[in-house]
Image (spheres, rainbow, N blue to C red):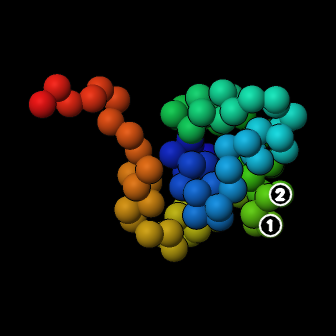
């Protein structure tokens, strides 16, 4: 699972970064923020999102099938520009 997939699944299921951090035992959302920008996630993130959603995401085929069901604009809907426009 990639960070992008984690972010899309989390947002679609209305799970906050704080809820996911709490499930993983973190006191801040920084690890979630960093994980959502990573190419590869530790298995504990996959287990945590699986538990919160109720679907086992340990199989890549399951992740791919689930991602096909999500709206395409979901991944970019909440992204903020890295650098604000000067104009």
Look at mark 1 in the image and give the residue it sits on.
54
Q: With 10 as the anchor, is 47 left or right in this view?
A: right
Residue 66 x/y as whole percent: 58, 68
Q: How crowded is mark 2: few (under 14 residues within 10 Å), some or many (20 or more)?
A: few
Residue at disc 2, secondary structure: helix
Nearest to the observer: residue 42 or residue 29: 29
Q: How many numbered marks are there?
A: 2
Look at mark 2 in the image and give the residue it sits on.
51
Residue drawn at 82 percent across, 29 percent down: 27
| Residue 30 higher or lower than 73, as above or below | above
Q: Farthest residue toward the front?
A: 87
Image quadrant containing the C terminus: top left
Q: Residue 30 carries which label?
A: none
| Residue 66 higher or lower than 80, as above or below | below
Residue 36 x/y as whole percent: 56, 38
Quick check: can you spot residue 42?
yes
Residue 86 x/y as whole percent: 17, 26
In three-dimensional space, the C-alpha distance between marks 2 and 1, rounded to whole angstroms, equals: 5 Å
Q: With 44 as the anchor, is 2 left or right in this view?
A: left
């Amino acid at each position: 699972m990639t960070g992008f997939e984690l972010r899309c699944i989390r947002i679609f299921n209305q799970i906050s970064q704080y809820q996911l951090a709490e499930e993983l035992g973190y006191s801040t959302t920084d690890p979630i923020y960093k994980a959502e920008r990573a190419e590869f996630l530790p298995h504990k993130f996959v287990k945590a999102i699986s538990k919160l959603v109720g679907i086992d995401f340990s199989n890549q085929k399951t992740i791919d099938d689930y991602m096909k069901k999500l709206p395409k604009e979901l991944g970019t809907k909440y992204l903020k520009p890295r650098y604000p426009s000067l104009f």
